[in-house]
Every structure is written in C-alpha cells, then in structure tokens.
Image (spheres, grey):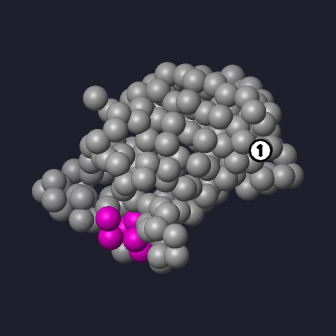
Amino acid sequence: MAVNFIGHILKKLRKERKLTLKDLAEQTGVSISFLSQVERGKSSVTLESLRKIADALNVDPSVFFSESEEQGERVERLEPFYYKDLSAGIKEANFAPILVTLQPGENKGNAFSHSGFEFLFVIEGVLTVEIDGMQMDFPAQQSTMFDARKKHYWFNHTNAAVRFLVVSSKMN
C-alpha cells in the first residue's frame, strides 16, 4: 500500500506540472523505467531517489508519506528507513521535521546532496553519518548540522535500531 501511495502521488504531481516521465527522468537522473515502476507501485523508492524527485517537482519529500488512519500520523516505510512526519500538516514552514528509525545493520546506500541544511539529533542508538566521504558516529543525545549540498548519508552499523530527528530546511 505504501508503494502504491507514493506512486499515486508521484504521478499526480508529475501530471500537474505537465511533465512526461522522460522530462522527470532528465531532471532527476533517475531512469524512465524506474519512475514508471514507482508510479505503478511495482518498485519502492530509496531516500536518495525520493529526494531527487521531490527537488525536481519542487515539493518537500513529506508529501509522499501516507496518513495512518489510526492516529492521523504520517508514517512511511522507505527501504531501509521508517519515517514519521512531525510537521503537523503545516506546509508553509521553511523546514521539515521528520522522525527516522533506521533498522539494525542498515548500512547500504549512496551519498546524495540537496539544497538547504540538515540538523540531526540522535534519540536512541548510535547513528553513523557520512558527510563528504567522512564518517562520524553520533550516540544518543548528540546532534550535528551541516550544509545538505555536501554529499551525505545515514548508516546504522550496530545491531540495535537507531531513532533520530532530521530537520531539513526547504528549498528557496
């Protein structure tokens, strides 16, 4: 269901902007076939690809999060992350707060960059952050902030879940 929801929103936003799959592929560097599979709910999307797509569509990535019927919370599973949008539905803010749970041993992924800044605060566990090729470990109750135009990625090299808050500033 989550994959179908993301695909539905992606297709809707793309069509609203009168973009073809080819147009979006050229803007994001993501293949036409992959975008088509995501739109049809046949493939899940990584954080890196989702951020590229959101930037190209000029939206915050949280628009792709589904609403949980039980609590009205936006929660999404994007391999290998669990996201919870903490924006309370406010779209006009210049930042987007998201609670992320990174599962044990999740250490695959490619560094990416985007506009704005990122603030990370570790709630529990030990988060490994790579920024411009340099890896740093942040235990619970520690934080960092950096220019998100630098290539970066998050990893969990431990055997326990890591929960952390990400606050990303939006594009200008």
Element type where label 1 sits in the image: strand
Helix, strand or loop for the magenta stretch, by majority: helix
Residue of label 1: 124
Q: What is the x, y in percent for residue 62? A: 42, 52
Task: Classify residue 31 as left or right of residue 84.
Answer: left
Please name the residue shown 66% across and 43% down the image: 164
How many marks overall?
A: 1
Can you say whether 133 is above or below 11 in the image? above
Q: Is residue 49 magenta?
A: no
Query: What amino acid is labelled 1 in the image?
Result: Glu
Q: Residue furthest right?
A: 159
Residues packed near mark 1 inside 10 Å, few (<14), some (14 to 19) or many (20 plus): some
Please name the residue shown 44% across and 61% down the image: 65
Please name the residue shown 16% across and 54% down the image: 17
Q: Residue 107, can we see it? A: no
Please name the residue shown 47% across and 35% down the image: 168
Q: What is the x, y in percent for residue 63? A: 36, 56
Q: What is the x, y in percent for residue 10? A: 32, 61
Q: Residue 91, can we see it? A: yes
Closer to the camera in the image, 92 or 26: 92
Image quarter in which the C terminus is found: top left
Task: Quadrant for residue 39, please give it.
Answer: bottom left
Closer to the camera in the image, 83 or 22: 83
Q: Residues in magenta?
A: 4-9
Closer to the camera in the image, 85 or 64: 85
